[in-house]
Image (spheres, rainbow, N blue to C red):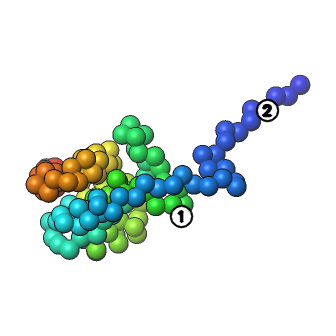
């Protein structure tokens, strides 16, 4: 007698809709007021973080699915294109950041989206970590 273990259901099974993303246009505007987290220059684009970090409550974003607007950091247009041209986690590692740290930075920026001074301090501290 053979037994077979049924496969676990996919989070997005055929015929099901993807989880609606949480939009926050105010956060995107707030991010664009900051300098690039890598270069310190303006202008910037709101770069969404796609990969998951379960320890911080960020789920992995599926194909053709944009992450929630709470998971963004400011990147110059050139760095934003570079981020999308390669493995995202490797991109951040190549620029001196562990994945968990960049997700935590995005969460802190979102938490302080109404406090420009606090967001500038977060970016300054992040750039200092990058250079260490």
Quadrant (top left, top right, bottom left, bottom right) of the N terminus:
top right
**Residue 71 placement, left or right of 7:** left
- Residue toward you, 72 or 51: 72
Residue 117 is situated, as x and y percent measured from the top left of the image, at: 10, 54
Query: Label 2 belongs to which residue?
Result: 4
Along the horizontal axis of the image, is 130 left or right of 48?
left
Can you give x and y, in whole percent of width and height, for residue 46 in the image?
A: 30, 65
First reached walking from the N terminus: tag 1 or tag 2: 2
**Mark in front: 1 vs 2:** 1
Work out whether residue 86 or residue 117 is closer to the camera in this orientation and state it: 117
Residue 91 can be seen, yes or no = no
Q: Tell me if residue 41 comes above or below residue 117 in the rendering.
A: below
Residue at 19% across / 66% down in the picture?
Answer: 33
For the question of whether residue 106 can be seen, the reply is yes
Kindly identify the residue that appears in the image at 29 percent across and 59 percent down: 27
Kindly indicate the quadrant of the structure image that contains residue 77: bottom left
Mark 1, other Cα within 10 Å: few <14 / some 14–19 / many ≥20 = few
Binning the other alpha carbons within 10 Å of mark 2 as few (below 14), some (14 to 19) or many (20 upward) gives few
Residue depicted at 74% across the width and 32% down the height = 5
Question: In the image, is 13 to the left or to the right of 58?
Answer: right
**Residue closest to the eye, 35 or 130:** 35
Residue 58 position, x and y percent, is 41, 45
Mark on residue 64? Answer: 1
Residue 112: image location, x then y, percent = 21, 49
Numbered circle sitting on residue 110: none
Element on which disc 2 rests? loop
Secondary structure of residue under mark 1? loop
Residue under the point 53% across and 64% down: 64
Find residue 28 and report its image quarter. bottom left
**How many discs mark residues in the rendered view?**
2
Outermost residue toward the right in this view: 1
Marks 1 and 2, how far apart at CA: 33 Å
């Amino acid at each position: 007698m053979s037994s077979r273990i049924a496969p676990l259901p996919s989070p997005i099974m055929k015929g099901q809709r993807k989880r609606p993303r949480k939009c926050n246009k105010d956060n995107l505007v707030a991010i664009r007021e900051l300098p690039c987290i890598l270069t310190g220059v303006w202008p910037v684009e709101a770069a969404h973080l796609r990969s998951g970090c379960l320890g911080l409550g960020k789920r992995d974003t599926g194909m053709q699915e944009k992450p929630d607007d709470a998971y963004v950091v400011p990147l110059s247009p050139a760095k934003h294109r570079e981020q999308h041209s390669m493995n995202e986690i490797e991109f951040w590692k190549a620029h001196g950041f562990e994945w968990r740290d960049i997700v935590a930075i995005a969460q802190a920026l979102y938490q302080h989206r109404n406090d420009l001074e606090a967001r500038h301090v977060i970016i300054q501290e992040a750039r200092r970590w990058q250079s260490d």
